[in-house]
Amino acid sequence: MSSILDLEVFARTADTGSLSAAARTLGLTPAAASIALKRLETRLGVRLLARSTRSMRLTEEGRCYLDSVRLALAALSEGEQGLKRHGEGLNGVLQLAAPSDFGRTVLLGWLDDFKQQHPHIRLQLLLNDKNADLFRETVDIALRFGVPNDSSLVALPILANHHRVACASPAYLARHGTPREPADLAQHSALIYMRHGRPNNTWSFRKGDVVQEVPVHSDYLCDDGEVARRWALAGHGVTYKAGLDVVRDIRAGRLVPLFEGWQGEPAPLNLMCPHRAQVSERVKVFQAFLQQRCHALLNDVRNDQ
């Protein structure tokens, strides 16, 4: 089967009457265009263009073949445009990976609203605290907390100024007392979960120019952020979570934020994509939707305080 480039060179040459002009419109050198035309004629076993040093004209075989080539190129162009409209339009599948706790406690309810606004977008959701491999798994985009450290991925910001929060249940604090400074965590039970396969047992806090890196210990260790939050709600210790994960619990009084004036480590929320070509229209719409919902959720809590 002939290559699309060979067919385009033939059709453009027939339209312009010049192999050099055809090469310019296709971004080729005259030599490359000549090779493409010869390759096509060799494969077909006929001369498509009668060429001399001064002129170029279609042969009879060339005229017969040109109509078929134009139909084929038009069909391919129409197919590409249809695929582009499908990929960039508000339809098709949105394949999304998200952290388990944020996905279950916050995102699921939002996705119902998103689906009502965009009924032609089909949702495929993967909940896992292990970072999805965007180059191997059937996932287009992934929601991730934390400063992006993979330069091969494109980060689409959702919530830039966002941090982790140390908090505990009122019942736990009533039994063990309330730590006033991050260093007081040495006398408390921390609820530790695995991040990227390693226990997150050093918690960072900042107050102005002062930074404290606090080692923590616990009898509770898990690889699921939702479990760590549930353990905190059950009164087993202090958890260190992304603010969005616990903001509703704090608002309802189920958890109490600790260390007023101290800020936990940065945990910006981003949509991660393998490359810019996958930032389709539906991804952009979803990004804007999440930005609005995340800011609204945090602002609602601030207004209640």
Image (cartoon, rainbow, N blue to C red):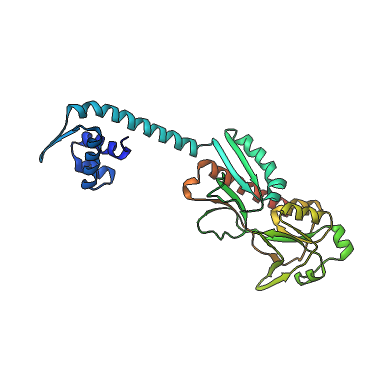
Identity of the residue drawn at 59% across and 49% down: 142
Image x and y of residue 263, in percent = 69, 65
Image x and y of residue 152, in percent = 50, 56
Q: Is residue 304 in sight in this rendering?
A: no
Q: Nearer the viewer, residue 288 or 245?
A: 245
Q: Where, quadrant-wise, is the N terminus in this rendering?
A: top left
* Image mark count: 0
Q: Is residue 239 left or right of residue 147?
A: right
Identity of the residue drawn at 76% across and 72% down: 183
Q: Is residue 23 left or right of residue 55?
A: right
Image x and y of residue 185, in percent = 78, 69
Q: Is residue 187 above or below residue 271?
A: below
Q: Quadrant of residue 3?
A: top left
Identity of the residue drawn at 74% across and 54% down: 246
Q: Is residue 126 in sight in this rendering?
A: yes
Q: Is residue 292 left or right of residue 236?
A: left
Q: Residue furthest bottom?
A: 210
Identity of the residue drawn at 25% across and 35% down: 43
Q: Is residue 6 above or below residue 132?
A: above
Q: Where, quadrant-wise, is the C terminus in this rendering?
A: bottom right
Q: Nearer the viewer, residue 199 or 169?
A: 199
Q: Is residue 165 above or below residue 112?
A: below
Image x and y of residue 254, in percent = 82, 53
